């Protein structure tokens, strides 16, 4: 690993669910980025990408989130979030919401900030040009490419390449990896039976791999699959990509 | 005599599509059917893999998709022009053209045409448009028997059932169920199945062939749909696999085709793109076995009395909505059904329409409006995973249209006292401003401190039970990231 990010300032987009439920993930992002020589800032104005509202049909409730995002992150060259889903929502839905609000000024501001918003894996691979971030994680791990990270944010195989470069890792393929875990935001509670059927199949595939850890780039999906894994006492732990990347030899996991 | 005994064809199940409860409820029932889930997993898995292999072979697949999208967009933008051109071309070629605003009008036209021929039965080519308008039942009410001749449609009809898939309407049945249906029902409506028939697919197909043969040879009138209608030439196109369509389209003297107005294509050359997209996307074949094309009447060859009924039935509603309009590009390949993780688990009957799966979830609320429970629930019948868009040969952004329709439904429900709008308004307040958000964070942190040794929550009462019935829920940690940052890093960042 070489340090080549000296002088780059990154605004961390923690995402609301990580902020409240999974603070370990944004902490891990800070650790990884600083290890690579970035300066990390956390604009305190930020809240949420608003996709829960958008995807449930409440566009008006989502618009303040768009304004807020613009307010928090305008002026930064790099906005980095540990979530393909939230980054995808910013990219794909914020322009549409600005149009819904009939606010051309907001639309222009959105275009500006959207162009500088990255999922963690994109920022590491494309901007910093690294896949080996100096991580060490001597465990059997399987990776689920979450739907929004692949199909909306389009992170491609970047997370996988980052994982492959982790020392000591035993990365095993997940069968039917491209199938949705059934989270889908409010889908998980509006269609709980279908959602659980999907999550159970995903959890079964995870257990079949014999992995100790299931990793994704989205904690919401992890919470869904993990909810089944925990209920069934599977012994499989869930972990965000950032937390594996943050772990180094001599670290405390 | 009871009404049942007077029927000419097997009765479908009781009830109507629009009277069906919301998707969630239907889905729950279907999920409980283990056999169904097994049949669907196997069938969709197989066809998915075939499609993927056939698409893989075409290096310019993405260009083809873009071309398909562009041709359909252009057609929809000038639909009025192309429809008038189509009418003109058809008439010049000797076909009679009828226009139908809705299902009732279309049915009235077709029933009238059949009655004018003085016959009491027709043979049918598999057609989604006629299923959509429920033509068979309209004919039945007029004392006319409509015989489905596609194998899977025959299974559905003889099984007193409804279709559950666009391409393979009996996908929910396995072969032993098919054998039972054939044994029990065929003898009541024509040539019986052999008593010693097994569930071997070849034997079942043989029984269907014999059962249908006498109907083909007897029929004076055939009814079809069309995959494409060429404005330039007045040519109709039917794409099929079994040859039953070819029989219907060539043997009877009268041919009536019921065609949705969005099926028009400007020129014959446009077909090239769709004939490459459709077979690979639908059956996973390089080319389907039978493609029939006819242009009005050819004297002395094939049907001499040719009618085309052009049906709107809600399509202009979708056309008028720029966000919903792309759904009209659909060529009914069913790739989106086969890839859909929701469809795979609940099957087609939960969607309350002949159009199930992702395309059904965006099409039905547009064609029928959102006045009924089932149509209000369909836009939510998706986890928005996006797999449907990836496989759609005409690049219909199904997830985006779903979200757009969710907004329509939410607007429709606004002002009604419901949990959801209230919860959304409350959450909207919390997330609109970081100060509100921090307050909520403190509440979450307090909850965590109240249950210090709990990391996961098990089953909880309603409404949280929707999550926790089968899934544990992690507890929020006592300290949010924001709080940690303020404590540890707040000083540095000025
Ligand atoms: S929406 Fe697309 S994938 Fe689905 S049936 Fe129509 S054309 Fe095929």
Image: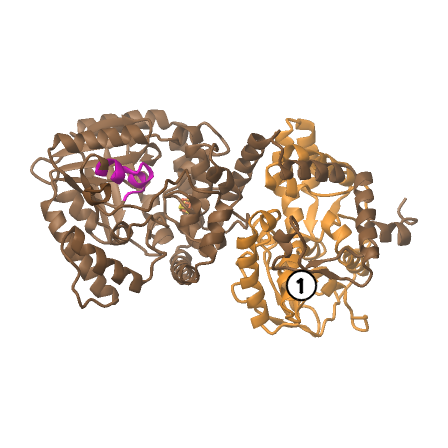
Chain colours: A orange, B brown
Q: Chain of mark 1?
A: A
Instruction: Please tell me whether residue B132 belongs to the stretch shown in magenta.
Output: yes
Residue sitting nearer the eye, B69 or B455: B455
Q: Quadrant of the C terminus of chain A?
A: bottom right
Assign ligand 1 to one image quadrant: top left
Q: Quadrant of the N terminus of chain A?
A: bottom right
Q: Which residue is mark 1?
A: A162
Res B84 quadrant in image: top left
Residue occupying the point 76% across, 41% down: A73
Measuring 53% from the left and 54% from the top, which residue is drawn there?
A194
- Residue B8 visible to an observer of this rendering: no
**Which span of residues is magenta-colored?**
B127-140
Q: Residue B212 at x, y = what percent? A: 16, 52
Q: Main secondary structure of the magenta part?
A: helix
Crowding around mark 1 (Cα neighbors within 10 Å: few <14, some 14 to 19, many 20+) is many
Q: Residue B411's x, y, as percent?
A: 58, 31
User: Is residue B386 among the parts visible in the rendering?
Assistant: yes
B225 shown above or below B231: below
Judging from the image, what secondary structure is the residue with disc 1 in?
Answer: helix
């Amino acid at each position: 690993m070489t340090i080549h990010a000296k002088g780059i300032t990154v605004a961390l987009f923690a995402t609301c669910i990580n902020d409240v439920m999974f603070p370990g993930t944004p902490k891990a992002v800070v650790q990884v980025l600083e290890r690579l020589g970035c300066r990390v800032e956390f604009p305190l104005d930020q809240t949420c990408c608003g996709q829960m509202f958008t995807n449930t049909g409440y566009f008006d409730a989502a618009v303040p989130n768009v304004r807020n995002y613009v307010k928090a992150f305008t002026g930064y060259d790099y906005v980095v979030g540990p979530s393909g889903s939230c980054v995808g929502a910013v990219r794909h839905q914020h322009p549409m919401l600005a149009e819904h609000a009939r606010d051309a000024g907001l639309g222009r501001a959105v275009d500006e900030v959207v162009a500088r918003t990255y999922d963690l894996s994109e920022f590491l691979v494309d901007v910093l040009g690294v896949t080996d971030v100096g991580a060490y994680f001597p465990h059997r791990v399987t990776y689920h490419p979450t739907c929004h990270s692949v199909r909306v944010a389009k992170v491609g195989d970047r997370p996988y390449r980052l994982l492959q470069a982790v020392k000591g890792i035993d990365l095993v393929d997940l069968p039917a990896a491209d199938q949705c875990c059934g989270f889908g935001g409010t889908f998980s509670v509006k269609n709980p039976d279908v959602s659980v059927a999907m999550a159970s199949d995903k959890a079964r595939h995870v257990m079949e791999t014999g992995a100790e850890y299931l990793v994704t780039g989205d904690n919401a999906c992890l919470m869904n699959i993990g909810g089944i894994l925990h209920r069934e006492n599977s012994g499989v732990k869930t972990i965000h990509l950032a937390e594996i990347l943050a772990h180094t030899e001599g670290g405390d996991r | 005599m009871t009404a049942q005994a007077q029927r000419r064809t097997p009765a479908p199940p009781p009830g109507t599509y629009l009277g069906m409860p919301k998707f969630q409820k239907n889905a729950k029932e279907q999920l409980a059917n283990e056999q169904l889930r097994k049949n669907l997993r196997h069938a969709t898995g197989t066809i998915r893999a075939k499609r993927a292999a056939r698409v893989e072979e075409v290096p310019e697949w993405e260009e083809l998709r873009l071309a398909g999208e562009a041709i359909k967009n252009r057609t929809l933008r000038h639909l009025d022009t192309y429809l008038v051109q189509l009418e003109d071309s058809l008439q010049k070629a000797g076909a009679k053209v009828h226009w139908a605003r809705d299902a009732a009008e279309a049915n009235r036209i077709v029933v009238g045409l059949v009655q004018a021929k003085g016959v009491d039965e027709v043979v049918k080519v598999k057609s989604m448009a006629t299923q959509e308008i429920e033509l068979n039942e309209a004919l039945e009410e007029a004392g006319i028997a409509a015989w489905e001749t596609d194998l899977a449609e025959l299974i559905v009809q003889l099984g007193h059932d409804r279709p559950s898939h666009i391409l393979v309407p009996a996908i929910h049945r396995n072969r032993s169920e098919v054998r039972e249906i054939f044994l029990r029902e065929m003898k009541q409506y024509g040539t019986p199945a052999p008593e010693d028939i097994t569930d071997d697919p070849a034997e079942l197909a043989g029984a269907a062939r014999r059962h249908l043969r006498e109907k083909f040879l007897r029929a004076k009138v055939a009814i079809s749909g069309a995959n494409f209608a060429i404005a330039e030439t007045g040519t109709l196109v039917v794409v099929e696999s079994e040859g039953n369509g070819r029989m219907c389209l060539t043997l009877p003297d009268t041919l009536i085709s019921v065609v949705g107005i969005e099926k028009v294509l400007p020129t014959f050359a446009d077909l090239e793109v769709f004939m490459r997209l459709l077979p690979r996307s639908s059956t996973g074949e390089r080319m389907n076995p039978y493609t029939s094309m006819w242009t009005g009447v050819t004297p002395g060859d094939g049907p001499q009395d040719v009618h085309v009924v052009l049906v709107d039935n809600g399509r202009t509603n979708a056309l008028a909505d720029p966000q919903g309009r792309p759904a009209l590009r659909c060529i009914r390949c069913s790739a989106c059904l086969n890839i859909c993780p929701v469809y795979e688990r609940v099957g087609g009957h939960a969607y309350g329409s002949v159009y199930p799966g992702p395309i059904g979830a965006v099409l039905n609320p547009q064609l029928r409006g959102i006045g009924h429970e089932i149509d209000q629930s369909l836009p939510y019948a998706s986890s928005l995973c996006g797999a449907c868009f990836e496989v759609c040969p005409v690049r219909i952004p199904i997830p985006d249209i779903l979200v757009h329709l969710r907004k329509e439904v939410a607007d429709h429900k606004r002002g009604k006292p419901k949990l959801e709008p209230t919860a959304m308004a409350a959450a909207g307040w919390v997330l609109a401003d970081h100060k509100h958000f921090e307050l909520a964070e403190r509440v979450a942190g307090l909850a965590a401190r109240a249950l210090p040794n709990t990391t996961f929550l098990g089953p909880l009462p309603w409404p949280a039970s929707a999550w926790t019935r089968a899934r544990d829920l992690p507890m929020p940690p006592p300290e949010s990231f924001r709080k940690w940052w303020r404590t540890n890093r707040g000083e540095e960042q000025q």
